[in-house]
Image (tube, rainbow, N blue to C red):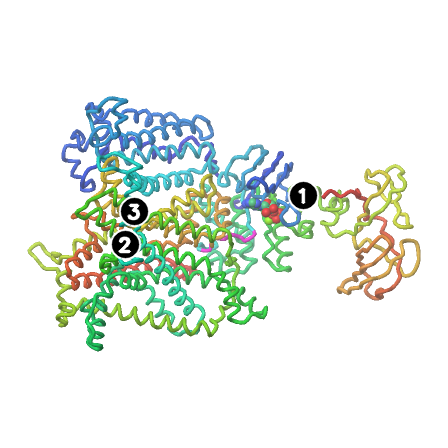
């Protein structure tokens, strides 16, 4: 059977740094392993070095220090042309003077396939992204989502060892974004591709990834599965970046085994200590894991500052002795009003302790 | 499936250049052969005849033994043929062999000339040399190129530019040709400025000649004459300022007014560009000269005596304004259009009225364009040769002085060189002032995002004078062109006004002889030469210009700024200076090409290359870099990317470069006048010759014909480049 097969290979960074000019350190001493056949997301705020990392895998930037391996092979000094890596660009970078078919065949022409094979593979690629029959059009005659798929097909047909995406969905509208990301994930899993995927959208990252690498200031802040990152963020930065979190200053008053007792104002709460010592710490609580009850009760007294109706749920800004927090409740039938006195407590699972001193 | 080039052991490019090197050395005539392309040398004693022999045969006959070491450099690369690029030996051998071969060729070329060693110290060191050598020929050229590209392949294998052979070779190639055809002649000329009469060099002798009163005198402030330097400077500043203002007026009318006939106006502003510059000077004489239409009718009207007032500054200034305003216009229209409308709209929503918007936003954003336009006007005026020659009277300028120093009775090379140094000083000075002034500010407003706004109309206070100026100037231009057309069909201007085609017939007669069609008109020779040279020069100029632009916009390498400066240098060098420099540099071995057509082609390439570079840079910066990058990640190498992605998207720039260099090759005079020969005469220099013989009718008829030929050529090029695009669209329509 002809079609697209994967020759997926792993990617490994060893102490890789990239310095632009003499001052700008875009990537600072990174170690990274992407297993063959997995989809790994690089996630982080703008300017943290995601694109640079990706371009170093492609060979579009050369490392300043360190080595890069694809499979078992050291490709550190290999230029882009000679690496078996394809990339889907944020702008798609479709060649405007070539038809869809010519665009998709472009890389095949340079890979030693004969005419018939080229055509066959290109057609298979177009079929895979659902664009059969669009081969004769020019990119300017396609919608944004279709252009995006052509860009994916063009990279896919080369059966690259690694496929790279740089914010591939940022030019699409919200609805399409969801659809296309699911398609990308589906193709990746079907073909068993190794994919490195850059985004600054945490929801997108959580949805598509086998593993997420959170970057901050040119370094890796944390890596792990979506669940690990969401439920056990290593620090305040990650907690906040992966699905908003309320960061509440707390005091660990007692440790029993791996269970810590923390005090928040006058309220005490017990949860896993995650290796923290006694003393100040932070409690990260997702807005959906906040409990609010009317009047006084077991918890921290607080007052509703703002109440916003967003259709499926209510969003509240609540002020307590320890500061202002954000809470999301599903009860839209009998919402609190601004000024209501409430008591805050926390869900049994969800809130996690993180160290107090947040590295800047 | 992707073949990784680093692991290959056969290298087609390497094999090609190794073979080329051997072919140049073993087969092709080493020294220059007249009429190489007729291949008569093949049957005329080659390979044993000394004049035609390849280097290997010469050495076999015991001559030119200094060429023998090149054998080593040619043989060494054979060692690495079966090796991988990653092996250190590969790079080392190529760098050493290529570098040594090339350096040796340069050294022997400069060191040994027509009379043995070129320098006394060489004779002292090595004893007198009995042998001698002539200008390099195709054999030497091919071998030298082979060494150069072996060298660049070595550099690439060592890892420069990610080991990219195409890019390193392109950089090496451009540096080599720019050095040989821009830096080398300029250096020779600078050296000539220090030459003494007895053939030595002297710094002390330079200053009295340099500070000569005929160059720097200020006599005109009292009642004498001023030095040529001051004349040129005053003229050039006036022309720079006035062409900029006129060009701006035209640009404003075209972009910021509701004027109806914009296309017509555009055509009118382009007309002077395809006119040989001095033709406008001729028309001015026909209008304002001693027996000119305007002069005689005014004289009759007011009863005053007709004078030669137009000769001198007023005449040259008028002619140059007519000739160079379009250039300023072309620069400014881009800038004026480029000011993002949304900036102007933003200003208006911030409660600025139209005048305030213009003054605070539009005008400052146009400043770089104004500086560029001024610079162009300044340089063109400095370099202009035809108009001062025709209209100068007693008002001498540098360019004509240089010409008379070289071709006149004085034949004083060092004076010509000194004047050229002054001229070069002025233009480089202006160039630097401009860069200095612009360098600190950023005016980029083109974001690449679609900008859907419209430019606001000019404020009324500005619109009225601008309209008036544009109307007057357009009318004047029309009259001038009317004169040119009319002047070409009257018997004898001002004397005998009967209509006739005799000038055209004299110039362009064809007759049927016994051997078929015969071109008997007096202009045909120079006409065909010009067409041939322009046709050769245009694609080469475009190619080298675009490759340079590609390197500058798409590649990063050490010394890129210096590289850019070098390629743009010839832009700041007036044609007159290039002409002198070429004569001084290429009249003697190692490169002896004066009197050939080649020198004309080469001078055009390097004169016009900066425009190709600029056009290329402008359009390449609009192509998103991710296009190249995606091509690279899809496995194309940089040459394939350049060919398959960049070139097709650069059609407009290619067209611009082709048209510009073709037209300039047909209209240029300042450098050409030094380089033409009896065998290779160009239209412009032929016409100037007719003018000097007061044969105005023929001169104008010939010029008019040229204008129409260029119009046709521009149209044809546009059609050629345009049709491919349409073709794509149709084929797509059929396929679907
Ligand atoms: N070519 C370059 N020259 C200089 N600095 C650069 C270059 N490319 C990126 N940078 C800098 O490196 C840092 C990381 O950039 P990038 O990898 O593009 O971030 P991200 O994709 O995460 O937004 C930024 O501070 C950016 O300004
Ligand atoms: Mg980025």
* Residue on which disc 1 sits: A213
- Give left or right: position of A177 versus B717: right
- Give left or right: position of B646 versus A355: left
Find residue A184 and report its horizontal and vertical position in percent: 61, 50
Tell me which chain the residue with mark 3 is part of. Answer: B
The mark found on residue B420 in the picture is: 3
Quadrant, the C terminus of chain B: bottom left
- Give left or right: position of B193 versus A60: left
Task: Characterize the local packing of mark 3: few (<14), some (14-19) or many (20 or more) Cα atoms within 10 angstroms.
Answer: many
Whether residue A226 is visible here, answered yes or no, is: yes
Q: Look at the picture and state if A146 lies above or below B96.
A: below
* Residue drawn at (37%, 42%) of the image: B174
- Tag 2 and tag 3 share a subunit: yes
The mark found on residue B17 in the picture is: none
- Tag 1 and tag 3 share a subunit: no
* Residue on which disc 2 sits: B397
Q: Look at the picture and state if B428 lies above or below A140.
A: above
Magenta part of the chain: A90-96
Cα gap from disc 2 to disc 1, whole angstroms: 71 Å
Find residue A318 and report its horizontal and vertical position in percent: 83, 58
């Amino acid at each position: 059977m002809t079609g697209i097969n994967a020759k997926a290979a792993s990617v490994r960074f060893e102490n890789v740094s990239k310095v632009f000019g003499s001052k700008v350190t875009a990537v600072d001493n990174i170690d990274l392993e992407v297993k063959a056949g997995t989809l790994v997301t690089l996630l982080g705020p703008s300017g943290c070095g995601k694109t640079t990392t990706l371009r170093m895998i492609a060979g579009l930037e050369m490392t300043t220090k360190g080595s890069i391996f694809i499979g078992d092979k050291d490709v550190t000094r290999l230029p882009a042309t000679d690496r078996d890596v394809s990339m889907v660009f944020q702008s798609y970078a479709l060649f405007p003077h070539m038809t869809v078919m010519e665009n998709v065949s472009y890389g095949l022409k340079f890979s030693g396939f004969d005419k018939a094979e080229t055509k066959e593979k290109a057609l298979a690629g177009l079929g895979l992204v659902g664009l059969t029959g669009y081969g004769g059009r020019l990119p300017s005659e396609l919608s944004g989502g279709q252009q995006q798929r052509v860009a994916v097909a063009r990279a896919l047909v080369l059966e690259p060892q690694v496929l790279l995406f740089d914010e591939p969905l940022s030019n699409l509208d919200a609805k399409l974004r969801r659809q296309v990301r699911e398609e990308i994930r589906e193709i990746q899993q079907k073909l068993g591709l190794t994919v490195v995927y850059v985004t600054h959208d945490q929801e997108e990252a959580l949805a598509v990834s086998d593993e997420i690498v959170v970057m901050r200031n040119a370094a890796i802040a944390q890596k792990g599965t979506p669940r690990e990152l969401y439920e056990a963020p290593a620090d305040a930065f990650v907690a906040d970046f992966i699905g908003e979190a309320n960061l509440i200053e707390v005091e660990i008053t007692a440790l029993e085994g791996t269970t810590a007792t923390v005090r928040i104002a006058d309220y005490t709460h017990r949860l896993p200590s995650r290796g923290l010592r006694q003393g100040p710490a932070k409690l990260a609580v997702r807005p959906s894991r906040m409990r609010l009850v009317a009047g006084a009760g077991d918890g921290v007294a607080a007052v509703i500052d703002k109440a916003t109706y967003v259709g499926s749920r209510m969003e509240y800004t609540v002020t307590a002795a320890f500061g202002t927090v954000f809470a999301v409740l599903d009860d839209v039938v009998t919402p609190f009003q601004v000024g209501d006195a409430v008591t805050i407590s926390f869900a049994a699972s969800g809130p996690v302790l993180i160290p107090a001193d947040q590295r800047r | 499936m992707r073949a990784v080039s680093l692991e290959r052991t056969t290298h087609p490019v390497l094999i090609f250049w190794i073979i080329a090197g051997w072919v140049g050395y073993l087969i092709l005539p080493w020294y220059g052969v007249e009429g190489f392309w007729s291949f008569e040398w093949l049957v005329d004693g080659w390979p044993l005849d000394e004049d035609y022999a390849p280097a290997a045969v010469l050495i076999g006959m015991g001559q030119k033994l200094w060429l023998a070491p090149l054998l080593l450099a040619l043989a060494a690369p054979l060692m690495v043929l079966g090796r991988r690029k990653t092996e250190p030996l590969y790079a080392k051998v190529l760098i050493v062999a290529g570098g040594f071969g090339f350096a040796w060729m340069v050294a022997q070329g400069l060191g040994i000339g027509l009379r043995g060693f070129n320098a006394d110290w060489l004779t002292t060191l090595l004893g007198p040399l009995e042998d001698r050598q002539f200008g390099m020929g195709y054999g030497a050229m091919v071998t030298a190129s082979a060494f150069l590209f072996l060298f660049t392949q070595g550099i690439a294998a060592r890892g420069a530019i990610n080991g990219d052979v195409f890019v390193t070779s392109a950089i090496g190639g451009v540096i080599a040709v720019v050095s040989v055809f821009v830096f080398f002649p300029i250096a020779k000329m600078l050296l000539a400025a220090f030459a003494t009469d007895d053939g030595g060099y002297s710094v002390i002798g330079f200053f009295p000649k340099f500070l000569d009163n005929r160059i720097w005198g200020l006599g005109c402030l009292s009642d004498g004459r001023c030095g040529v330097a001051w004349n040129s400077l005053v003229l050039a500043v006036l022309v720079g300022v006035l062409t900029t203002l006129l060009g701006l007026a035209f640009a404003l009318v075209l972009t910021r007014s509701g004027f109806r006939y914009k296309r017509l106006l555009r055509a009118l502003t382009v007309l002077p560009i395809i006119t040989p510059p001095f033709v406008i000077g001729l028309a001015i004489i026909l209008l304002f000269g001693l027996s000119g239409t305007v002069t005689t009718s005014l004289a009759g009207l007011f009863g005053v005596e007709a004078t030669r007032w137009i000769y001198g500054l007023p005449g040259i200034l008028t002619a140059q304004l007519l000739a160079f305003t379009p250039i300023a216009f072309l620069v400014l229209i881009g800038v004026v259009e480029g000011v993002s409308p949304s900036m102007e709209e933003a200003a208006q929503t911030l409660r600025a009225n139209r005048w305030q918007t213009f003054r605070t936003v539009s005008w400052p954003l146009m400043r770089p364009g104004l500086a560029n336009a001024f610079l162009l006007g300044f340089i063109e005026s400095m370099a202009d040769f035809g108009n001062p020659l025709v209209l100068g009277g007693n008002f001498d300028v540098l360019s004509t002085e240089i010409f008379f120093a070289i071709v006149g009775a004085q034949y004083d090379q060092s004076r010509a060189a000194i004047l050229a140094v002054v001229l070069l000083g002025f233009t480089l000075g202006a160039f630097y002032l401009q860069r200095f002034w612009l360098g600190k500010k950023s005016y980029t407003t083109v974001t690449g995002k679609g900008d859907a706004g419209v430019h606001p109309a000019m404020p009324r206070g500005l619109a009225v004078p601008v309209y008036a100026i544009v109307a007057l100037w357009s009318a004047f231009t029309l009259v001038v062109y009317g004169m040119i057309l009319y002047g070409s069909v009257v018997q004898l201007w001002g004397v005998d006004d009967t209509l006739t085609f005799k000038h055209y017939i004299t110039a362009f007669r064809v007759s049927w002889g016994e051997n078929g069609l015969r071109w008997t008109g007096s202009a045909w020779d120079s006409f065909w030469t010009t067409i041939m040279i322009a046709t050769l020069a245009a694609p080469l100029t475009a190619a080298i210009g675009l490759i340079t632009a590609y390197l500058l916009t798409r590649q990063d390498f050490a010394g890129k700024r210096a590289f850019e400066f070098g390629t743009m240098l010839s832009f700041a060098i007036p044609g007159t200076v290039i002409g002198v420099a070429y004569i001084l540099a290429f009249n003697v071995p190692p490169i002896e090409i004066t009197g050939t057509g080649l020198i004309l082609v080469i001078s055009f390439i390097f004169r016009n290359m900066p425009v190709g570079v600029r056009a290329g840079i402008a359009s390449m910066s609009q192509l998103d870099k991710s296009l190249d990058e995606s091509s690279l990640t899809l496995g194309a190498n940089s040459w394939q990317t350049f060919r398959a992605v960049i070139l097709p998207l650069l059609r407009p720039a290619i067209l611009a470069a082709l048209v510009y260099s073709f037209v300039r090759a047909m209209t240029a005079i300042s450098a050409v006048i030094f380089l033409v020969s009896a065998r290779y005469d160009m239209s412009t220099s032929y016409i100037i010759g007719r003018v000097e013989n007061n044969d105005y009718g023929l001169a104008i008829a010939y010029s008019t014909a040229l204008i129409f030929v260029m119009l046709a050529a521009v149209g044809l090029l546009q059609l050629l480049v345009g049709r491919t695009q349409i073709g794509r669209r149709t084929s797509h329509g059929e396929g679907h």
